[in-house]
C-alpha cells in the first residue's frame, strides 16, 4: 500500500486587483476601489530601461531587482505587474494587462 503525503497549499503573494491600458503615449493603471493613475511614456521608458524611478504626487514606479517586474507604490500600498505585459500593452500587442496587489 502506498503512503499519502499531505501538504498545505501556500497562497500566492499577489492578488489581482486592477488593469492597465495604453492611452496615447501613457500607461494608465486602474486599481479597483482606489482610482486611476497615469504614467507618462517618457517616465515609463526611463524606468523600464533601469535608469531611474518615476515619482508622482500619488506615489512612485520602479523596476524590480530582476528587471522582470514593475512595482507601483500608491498610497502606501505596493502593486506589481510583469514588465513583459507592460511592453505588450505599450506596443499594442495586448489591449490590457493585469495589476496585482502585493500581500
Image (spheres, helix red, strand yellow):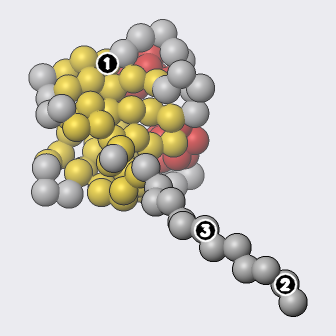
Query: In the rendering, at what x and y percent does residue 9 appear?
Result: 54, 66
Contact flag, marks 3 and 2 (Cβ < 8 Å): no
Q: Nearer the viewer, residue 13 or 46?
A: 13
As drawn, is 92 to the left or to the right of 53? Answer: right
CA gap between label 3 and label 1 equals: 42 Å
Residue 41 position by quadrant: top left
Looking at the rendered image, the quarter that the N terminus falls into is bottom right
Tag 2 or tag 1, which sits nearer the N-term? 2
Contact flag, marks 1 and 2 (Cβ < 8 Å): no
Vertical order, 37 against 99 (above or below): above
Q: Residue at x 29, y 43 (%)?
A: 28
Q: Residue at x 33, y 47 (%)?
A: 103
The residue sitting at the bottom extreme is 1
Residue on which disc 1 sits: 54
Query: In the rendering, at what x and y percent does residue 45 appear?
Result: 46, 22
Query: In the rendering, at what x and y percent does residue 79 appear?
Result: 33, 41
As drawn, is 84 to the left or to the right of 44? Answer: right
Residue on which disc 2 sits: 2
Q: Nearer the viewer, residue 12 or 31?
A: 12
As drawn, is 5 to the left or to the right of 28? Answer: right
Return the mark for residue 7.
3
Amino acid at each position: 500500500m502506498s503512503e499519502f503525503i499531505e501538504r498545505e497549499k501556500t497562497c500566492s503573494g499577489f492578488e489581482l486587483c486592477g488593469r492597465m491600458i495604453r492611452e496615447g503615449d501613457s500607461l494608465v493603471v486602474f486599481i479597483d476601489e482606489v482610482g486611476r493613475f497615469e504614467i507618462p511614456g517618457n517616465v515609463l521608458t526611463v524606468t523600464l530601461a533601469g535608469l531611474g524611478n518615476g515619482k508622482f504626487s500619488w506615489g512612485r514606479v520602479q523596476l524590480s531587482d530582476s528587471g522582470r517586474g514593475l512595482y507601483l507604490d500608491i498610497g502606501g500600498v505596493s502593486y506589481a505587474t510583469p514588465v513583459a505585459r507592460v511592453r505588450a500593452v505599450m506596443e499594442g500587442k495586448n489591449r490590457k494587462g493585469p495589476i496585482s496587489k502585493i500581500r
